[in-house]
Amino acid sequence: MFTTLPERFKQFHLHVDVRTLLLLQKSIDRSLVRTIGDLYNVLRTFVVKSPELMGPYTRAFYDYFLSIDIRPGEALHDAVLRSETFQQWKEQHQGRLNEEDLTREDMASLFLDEVHMTHYDIQKIIDGRALWEKDRGDMADDDNDAEAGDQEKRPLDRMADYSDLSLEELMQRMKEVLEQQNSKHSGGSHWVGTGGISPYGHGGAAKDGLRVGGSGGGKMARKVMGDTNFFPVDLDAILNDNNIDAALASLKGIMEESAQEKLDVKQTIDKGLERGGLFLPEIKNETDEKLQVLLFIDNGGYSMHPYIKAVQTLFRKMKTRFAHDLETYYFHNTIYGQVFSDPQRRKRVPIERILSKNPHYHVFFVGDAAMAPYELSNQSLNTYVEMTRHFKKCAWLNPEPLKFWDHTLTIQIIKEIIPMESLTPAGIERAVLRMNKQRKTDY
Amino acid sequence: MATKNYWEGSERYLCDPELAQAFHISRTLGMPLLIEGEPGTGKTELPLQYAADQQLDLFVYPAGSKSNVEQFVAKFDHVKYLRDSQIEILNAQREEKGLNAQLSTAGRRTESLSDYVLKGPATQAFSAPHSVLLIDEIDKAPREFPNDLLYALSHRKLVMPESGEVVEVSENNMPAIVITSNREQELPTAFKGRCIYHYIQFPEADKMRDIIQKHHPKVSNQIVDTALDIFYQLRKIGLERSPTTRELLNWLKYIKTFSTKEAVTKLNALDGLGTLIKTQADFEKVQRQLSLSGGQPPMGSSMN
């Protein structure tokens, strides 16, 4: 079943594999999935592993299961109104919906309510309705008794008993769906096709004022579209205020602080001898290096100006969250024998002092590395070489669009010395990954 | 089965339907529930309240920078073991010399290694059917920690050190495992893959009102309105560390000691801002922004 799901979800940068499908199967077996709303919620807990995947997930889900394609930046409502699925649904409900009373937005809301109705919601309706029926007192009691056995097992059937036809249709529909899917459903990729969503509604329950419209997923799905918190920022866009958190997330990757308890053999023997042969294991804590960062920012010239703020915010955010060592230095165009500790470039720091720092520092250069070739003198190149020799973990982050790299001579040269990535969340991630790898080979 | 029922929260805890559903899914499938979200959104409360409400055994493992699987699963007490084996020798020597007084090992026998296994929260939870196991703030643990948990989580099986004893739990008796994280570091993909994931969204104003209602039922509406208004404004101006639910509740705890009228004045003067704002830079920003936009005098009272 859903054999095309992994591939289709991949187009939305979502990871779905065999395990996900097996889990989904298991959820269906344990009757967690009984409506499309359920499917949305269950699949979400398997697929969405960080908040910024909520947006793509919602898009992928609508696309795959409901054939509703949401264009980037489009509100869910508009996409729904545009879709054929919605048209079909509307036709099927011609009689039930009072089109005069409802605006198009209301209709879309109704549709979404139905899509995102979960079996928990339906259960609530049933419970509410059952209570209501009981209160009326004119309900035939023997009816209930006859079904008592079944009720326990199949709450959804019970619902069909009390609610009007459309809900019974839903049951039928879901049964079909289950059968289809048990029999290795072969027709096409869509599990619940366009017809699938239509038959169930708040039906009778709504008339009693007990309507519970997609309480969970529905609201979320509606909120998600157009909310940048739940939509991945463009990971390949140059660092800006929107994707700074994504960049931060990749920077976090270099944090590998850890402490492990290890048996201190020497201490155990020494202490054991002192105690006259009573050997007690002595444990020592081994703390790995903490994250130490040296940041060199090119703040001279207009070309770098737009990025400086974003870069500083990024590293400052990191600093406030982790309170690790972070030192920032500034330079203009390229580094000669010195850098500056203030943005105005007045306080000089000779490069020797930098080079005397602990080689475990992670070093980031941020600059466009674009200058007149004569500016990149031998002295400057030597400085870079010395720095990479001293600090094993170096990376150059370049805000210049990648396509210009090949046309700038100085970028070409510096790239040879210091590994260069573009100043984008994805680029930072690559740089960090390489730094981490380096560490493993170093020790 | 009692523990697989859908749980919607209790009188003291307002459980978002989405979270309740994710929790239900995780228990039905016997998988751990990984909850992420901003600090102070009630991640840790879920298992605590659930266990209290359903009267289930609760085991908590707070993760920290020194967490390791040993602490979590079980530890072999080498020190006790060595001590006892030395005592055995000592006792034998004493006997030889005709001394009667024997040193005690408190019933532990060095032959049975399992006497020296100190069981951690995971083992205890796995041995108690339908219990609740909370692993709090797993993002604070070293990166190896979640990776080391993978086997135990997916096979529901724990192997005791040295004694080799295996503690297993059937899928039906699986404890409800809840793991919380503040996203201070990304968790390994393989680990996330074995969990049911849920991200707690920051509650909106009307839901926040319900939450306040549960914690401070006696606070007047006027105070709550004013506080919420200021609170969401503060969250909007883009502070380095936005105030969270927990901080709002603390603020109200302080404010509610005053009479309504006094309290509203105090709220508007941002009295007790220290409960909400935690960094100097944010403090300055709040001052600047609010004195610009609202034309209010700088909050001298709160600075004292």
Image (cartoon, helix red, strand yellow):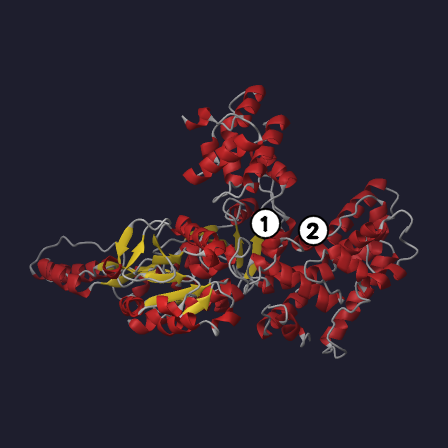
Q: Is residue B220 visible in the rendered structure shown here?
A: no
The image quadrant where one finds the C terminus of chain A is bottom left
Disc 2 crowd rating (10 Å Cα; few below 14, some 14-19, many 20+) is some
Q: Secondary structure at mark 2?
A: helix
Labels 2 and 1 in the same subunit? no
Q: Nearer the viewer, residue B9 or A197?
A: A197
Disc 1 crowd rating (10 Å Cα; few below 14, some 14-19, many 20+) is some
Q: Secondary structure at mark 1?
A: loop
Q: Where residue B248 sits in the image (x, y, percent)? A: 53, 36
Q: Which mark is residue A219?
A: 2
Q: Is residue A136 visible in the rendered structure shown here?
A: yes
Q: CA separation, marks 2 and 1? A: 12 Å
The correct choice, above or below, for A361 with respect to B260 in the image is below
Q: Where residue A89 sits in the image (x, y, percent)? A: 84, 61
Q: Nearer the viewer, residue A380 or B74?
A: A380
In this view, which residue lies farthest toward the left? B97
Query: Label 1 marks which chain's residue?
Result: B
Query: Label 2 marks which chain's residue?
Result: A
Q: Amino acid at mark 2?
A: Lys
Location of residue B162 (image quadrant) = bottom left
Residue matched to label 1: B201
Q: In the figure, is residue B85 to the left or right of A146?
A: left
Q: Where residue A291 sits in the image (x, y, percent)? A: 34, 58
